[in-house]
Image (cartoon, grey):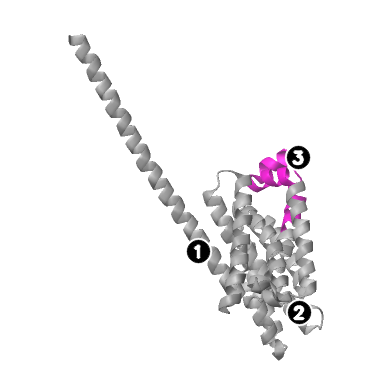
Amino acid sequence: MAVFEYEFMQRAFWAGGLIGVIAPILGVYLMLRRQVLMADTLSHVSLAGVALGSVMNLNPVICGFAIAIIGALLVEQLRRSYRTYSEVPVAIIMTSGLALAVVLMSLKTNLSKTFSSYLFGSIVAVSDIQLWMMAGVCVIGLLFFILLRRPLYNFTFDEETASIGGVQVRGLSFAFAILTGMTVASAMPIVGVLLVSALIVLPAALALRVSRSFTAAIIVAVITGLIGIFSGLTTSYHLNTPPGGTIALILLVILLTGISAQKLIARYNRKRHRKETKSQHVILVNHSRRNTSHEIQ
């Protein structure tokens, strides 16, 4: 294909494939834990890290990555202080990260082009260091979810029961928060700060809607994420549209199509069930009439 003739597109597909595997899996866990806004929060915090790195003449990618992890740990710590109001830590860290990013951006006037790629994504400009960072996050994330699948499963649905069962809930919570920060920071070059939650949440939203088991939900989420990213990149290349927005829109179309198809199938099954029930009722009535007729004779 012509799309693979260019090195930057090859890098883009590698980056998309790596994040397309780990981000949807994380999204399933975040949705089940009711922490879907975590992705948006950490993307704003990571943006502040990028601004800090630019102001201090450090590597903005590494700074954004590090600050996202610190933000994730702060959210987790605050979540334990506000157990009844779980949305409060997310709001505190999100507003703080965004405010810090705005202030730091004002200190350096030549950051508009750099921050445009972070806000809206520029996967075709993924650097080698970002690609290796994504590969590292993907490997670490897969090992995390595979090796700790049983404790994570119990921890996701009921932390108190998991704690009684011997799971180190506190340590697992902080490890999960660190992985979330790493994944969000790695996904930013693909879809940007404004759309990073779409890459994490939309595949998981479809998977949890149509799947009948947890394992099936993970598989459906990953497949959906990869289809959305690869088709979005291809469409963006041919139509010359922003990759991040194109990927997000395609994932949204897949989600809406999946929900509509599920409703149509459910409606068809209900109609078929009613017909079968009515047919069985008619058979029983006819059988009863024949028995009654034989008794009279």
- Dot 1 corresponds to which residue? 253
Q: Residue furthest left?
A: 297
Q: Earlier in the sequence, mark 1 or mark 2?
A: 2
What amino acid type should be assigned to the residue bearing mark 3?
Gly
What amino acid type should be assigned to the residue bearing mark 1?
Val
Residue 114 image-quadrant placement: bottom right
- Dot 2 corresponds to which residue? 52
Q: Is residue 261 left or right of residue 120?
A: left
Q: Residue furthest bottom?
A: 109
Q: Secondary structure at mark 2?
A: helix
Q: CA distance from mark 2 to mark 3?
A: 41 Å
Number of numbered discs overlaid on the protein picture: 3
Q: CA distance from mark 1 to mark 2?
A: 36 Å
Q: Secondary structure at mark 1?
A: helix
Q: Is residue 209 left or right of residue 129?
A: left
Q: Earlier in the sequence, mark 2 or mark 3?
A: 2
Which is more toward the observer, 27 or 155?
A: 27
**Which quadrant would the N terminus be assigned to in this image?**
bottom right
Check if residue 149 falls in the magenta segment.
yes
Residue located 40% across and 42% down the image: 269
Q: Earlier in the sequence, mark 1 or mark 3?
A: 3
Confirm whether residue 137 shows in the render. Answer: yes
Residue located 51% across and 59% down the image: 255
- Dot 3 corresponds to which residue? 166
Q: Residue 97: x and y, percent?
A: 68, 73
Which is more toward the observer, 290 or 201?
A: 290
